[in-house]
Image (cartoon, rainbow, N blue to C red):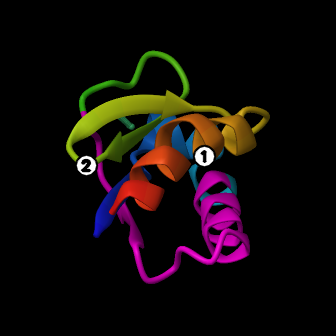
Amino acid sequence: MLNIEVCVGTSCYLRGSYHIINRLEELTEEAKLSDKVNISSIFCLGNCGTSTSVRVNGEVLSATIDGVDEFFKNNILPLAQKN
Ligand code: FES
C-alpha cells in the first residue's frame, strides 16, 4: 500500500490542501488504484514555506493546486503501479 499524507495545517490548508486531497482521490480512482493507494490528511509536516506538503511513503514533497495532476503522474503513479 502506498501511503499519501496531505498536510492540512494552516499554511498548507490556505494553499489548497482540500482541493489537492479531492483531486488525488479522483485521479487514484480514474487510474483504478484505489486498492493500492491510501490518502489521508495530517497536520504540519514542518515544511510550511512553499506549497502544500504531501508525504509519499515517508518522503515530504510539495504540490500545488495547478500542479496536482502532474504531481500524481510523476510522484504517485509510478510507485503505485509498482506495488
Ligand atoms: S502547515 Fe503544512 S507543512 Fe506546516
Residue picked out by circle 2:
57
Secondary structure state at the residue bearing disc 2: loop
- The residue tagged 1 is 72
User: Residue 45, percent across and down?
Assistant: 26, 37
Q: In front here: 59 or 1?
A: 1
Say which quarter of the image contains residue 41: bottom left
Please state if 42 lies on the left or on the right of 68 as rendered. Answer: left
Q: In which quarter of the image is ligand 1?
A: top left
On the image, the x and y values in percent for residue 2 come to 32, 61
Q: Nearer the viewer, residue 68 or 73?
A: 73
Residue at screen point 40% across, 30% down = 61
Q: How crowded is mark 1: few (under 14 residues within 10 Å), some or many (20 or more)?
A: some
Residue at x-position 40% and y-position 49%: 79
Q: What residue type is labelled 1?
A: Phe
Let me know if residue 37 is in the magenta part. yes
34 vs 82, left or right, is right
Q: Which amino acid does label 2 sit on?
A: Asn
Queried whether the magenta region covers residue 70, the answer comes back as no
Task: Please tell me which residue is depicted at 39% across the width and 25% down the height of the picture.
Answer: 48
Residue span colored magenta: 20-45
